[in-house]
Image (spheres, coloured by chain):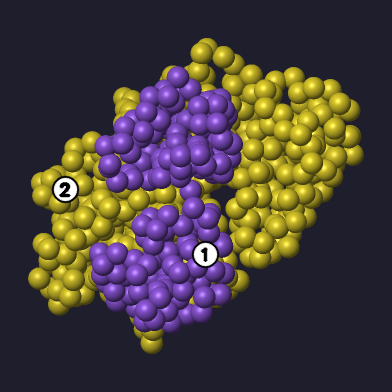
Chain colours: A purple, B yellow
Amino acid sequence: MSPETMSVFSPQLSERFDALVKKYPVKRSALVPMLLYAQDEVGYLSDAVIAEVAERLCVTELDVRNVASYYSMLRFKPVGKYNVQVCTNISCMLRGAYDLFEKFQDELGVGHKGITKDGLFSLEEVECIGACCWAPAIQVNYAFHDDLSPEQVPGILDQYRNKASAGGKSA
Amino acid sequence: MPRLVSHPDEVKIVSRRFGQGAAEIDKYIELGGYEAAKKCLAQGPDWIINEMKASNLRGRGGAGFPTGMKWSFVPKQSAKPKYVLVNGDESEPGTCKDHLIFLHDPHAVIEGMIIAGLAIGSRVGFIYLRGEYRYLLEIVEKAVADAYAKGFLGTNIFGSDTEFQIITQTGAGAYEVGEESALMESLEGKRGVPRIKPPFPAVVGLYGGPTVINNAETIATVPHVIAMGSEAYAAVGTPRNGGTRLFCLSGHIERPGVYELPMGYNLKKMIYEVGGGVRGGRKLKAVVPGGSSTPVLLPEEIENLGMDFDQVGKAGSMLGSGGVVVIDDQTCIVEFALRTISFYQHESCGWCIPCREGTDWLKKSLTRFHAGFGTAKDIDNIQYLADNMMGRTFCPLGDAAAMPTLGFVKKFRKEFEAHLDGKPCPFAKHVELAVV
């Protein structure tokens, strides 16, 4: 491994990758999970992340980019510390997801794919997240919040602001 | 946290252990878990496949293919390793049943996989979960580790000389990966683009080996079929539609939730009695019976409709993934159609031209239409576009986008006409500006 790429991941993540690569009958099967776990740690798929993942799996960087661009959760640009993903697909839409999304827009002062100035939040309108019976639902990073109404929005955001000021790690 | 619901009409088989802490292996065993797998280990593959065939269990992912039949297609002798694959990519809008299975009963999935492995002679299984289900992946990974610790998985399962390993995998956001061959591509570390069939996965699947791929609900049902006996299981449902199904009631319904009801349960009763009727006492306008890709049904069409694969098929729609989306009379169908097609446009991988172009143009047409700039010709054009997508793609995503669109236009033509020539939408609040 070249010295420039060695520092991209924490030792814990490095260890996790070593295990991942051995987990599958074919090494390349580790690609998508590796990208996702790397993104969880680094925040997005930076050039350095892509280079290291490619090297670890013995595939080209182009190959990695090609695969990564297919998956909607993988991103090539940073997002906020807390990425608020509002589902507006049919089941959520029927129960007021667009009102919810508007409330988030108003509260955060950013639109779809926007990041707040302090970098704490980003907002995204997403497709079905599999919480249709508890609609409308959102995910903040990986945490689900369901059965929401616009009135609950400020409370949810405060919860994450408090978490950030307490120095907590992202959920 | 997803709320659990219940209703006296429910027949709890798959959901029997929900809410009882069965994600813990000791609790699962206490509730009778892993007995079915042990029984199968003693009985052997032919017996298992016969039981599965006799149970009339059909695939819960949407297509409704008989599970026993699917397993029997796997060749007995194979130069390449055989695989069991669980599809937990659950991403059909309106569907959230597998969410509860992974949350409350992950060991049922593991046990079902062991049984499938014994039936087809496979030594390795994969559980593929959609990327958004990270907290569920952690639950499943713990369950798998616990099963290894007990010796239920590994090189000598239950102290026998049979081997079965389970590997978990996360997706990263893609509806199309729910299609079986696309899922295999994704699991091989590639773009989730579908493969041409034949060859079918039972012959050439994951890593080129014979593969059985089942929906998570199907696999979680398998131990129950073995435990209660195929005859008893089949008797719960209707002819050729064995057992129960997890129905996800969502949308404008008083008591939304996942209910386990016998196959063939009347849809009207499901909405009005089990689900408590349309929210706020409003009138029912339409129902999407099996996830967003299934053609919409009108209130008069559900009167005597039993919810099984054959009856819903006869009614011109599909039982699909069990996602029942209820729509009230204050909803704009054009807006609903637009939101539906926007999803498929977003998820189309672009591999097959009819789907890539079709979904895009349908979205453009419906956006323009909804904004009040449609013309009478557009309605026929929407139908023409959708017709030209049907059956012309590698995977069913093209059909999944075309079918509901055709249904909306056919059944709500009047409402489309009400949007013609600059008239404002009679319902909608959110009208996007036309971009074409």
Q: Residue furthest bottom?
A: B79
Q: Is residue A155 above or below residue B39?
A: above
Image side of residue B427 versus residue B72, left or right: right
Who is closer to the viewer here, B61 or B330? B330
Tell me which residue sits at (67%, 61%) in the image.
B350
Residue pictured at 63% horizontal, 50% vertical = B346
Mark 1 — residue?
Answer: A68
Judge whether residue B101 can be spotted in this image.
Answer: no
Q: In front: B368, or B211? A: B368
On-image quarter of the C terminus of chain B: top right
| Residue B138 seen by the camera | yes
User: Residue B221 or B233: which is nearer the viewer?
Assistant: B221
Can you identify the residue that label 2 sits on? B24
In this view, B37 is above or below B24:
below
Location of residue B97 by image quarter: top left
Query: The disc numbered 2 marks a residue on which chain?
Result: B
Q: In the image, is residue B390 above or below residue A35?
A: above
Q: Nearer the viewer, mark 2 or mark 1?
A: 1
